[in-house]
Image (tube, rainbow, N blue to C red):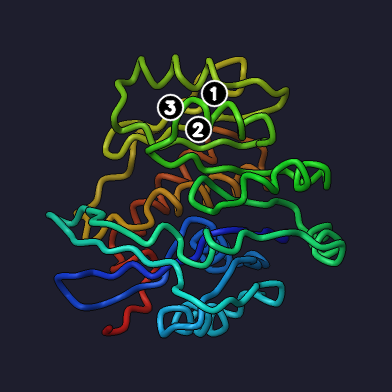
Amino acid sequence: MKVLGIGDNVVDKYVHLRLMYPGGNALNFSVFAKKAGVDAAFIGVFGDDHEARHVEHTLRELDIDISRCRYHSGENGCARVTLEDGDRVFLGSNEGGVTRLHPLELSEEDKDYLGGFDLIHTGLYSHTGHLLPELEALSIPISFDFSDDFTDSQVEQFIKHADFAFFSCSHMTDEETQNYIRSKRIKEGQILVATRGGDRSIAYDGTKFYFQMPDSVEAVDTMGAGDSYITAFLLSFLEKGNIQAAMAEGSRLAAQSCLVEGSFGYGVHY
């Protein structure tokens, strides 16, 4: 199995600790997949600052293929965060930095390269929405994370290209979540999954709903928990084709992720 994260890479700067950790939804997917023993690659845009070099160095240390990444002068993606009782709280960001200012465009060589993967994951913060029709044309399963501040117009614009769609729905009740993901499924074979923090996650395949309670842990840091759930769900489903088993695996890895500082460690002072 070979999987690819395409889109956002950031450093999460923990202002109360003066530490920064690599992160970003697409990048985290690649890292968590690699840590699970899967051949993983990442395509994104790096700036030319200290933050970018730290992320790049970390990915090289983890042996993740970044050969198709781009480099531009400017700030790497950066977010400022703090922790409240182990729960990460975002304080602001530069909205992706060079990833937003220099959106990815795919060359024919890129498309040939992408043809070797079994799954592509991206998301709302990746600034890759314009690429979705091209990615879909490659006939490779696409996973898209809408995170927690999606709008209906964004969902309607992007979900038609996704085989797997993920939502963070802690702001919705159980019933509201079920109604929402059922109403947004528009493509045959499409699976929609909503995580809800400490409440049960919900998946819908067009026929039935599936439910999974989260594994209970004393969280050190919830940063990256949703991304680890997504990664574990996708890898399990690609291997076994079982939604319920994939949700259980997602909950297991998300709980483990909550015991790690940052998305996956590798913090340095800034």
Query: In the picture provided, is 45 more to the left or to the right than 227?
Result: right
Q: Position of residue 52 (x, y in %)?
A: 47, 79
The reply to whether callout 1 and callout 2 are in contact (CB within 8 Å) is: yes
Are there few (<14), some (14-19), or many (20+) residues within 10 Å of tag 3? some
The amino acid marked with disc number 1 is Tyr
Q: Position of residue 18 (x, y in %)?
A: 20, 78
Q: Residue at x 23, y 56 (%)?
A: 91
Give residue 71's mark: none
Residue that mark 2 sits on = 193
The amino acid marked with disc number 3 is Phe
The amino acid marked with disc number 2 is Val
State how far apart marks 3 and 1 are (Cα).
9 Å
Q: Residue at x 66, y 60 (%)?
A: 104
Q: Quadrant of residue 260?
A: bottom left
The relative height of residue 61 versus residue 246 in the rendered view (above or below) is below
State how far apart marks 1 and 2 are (Cα).
7 Å
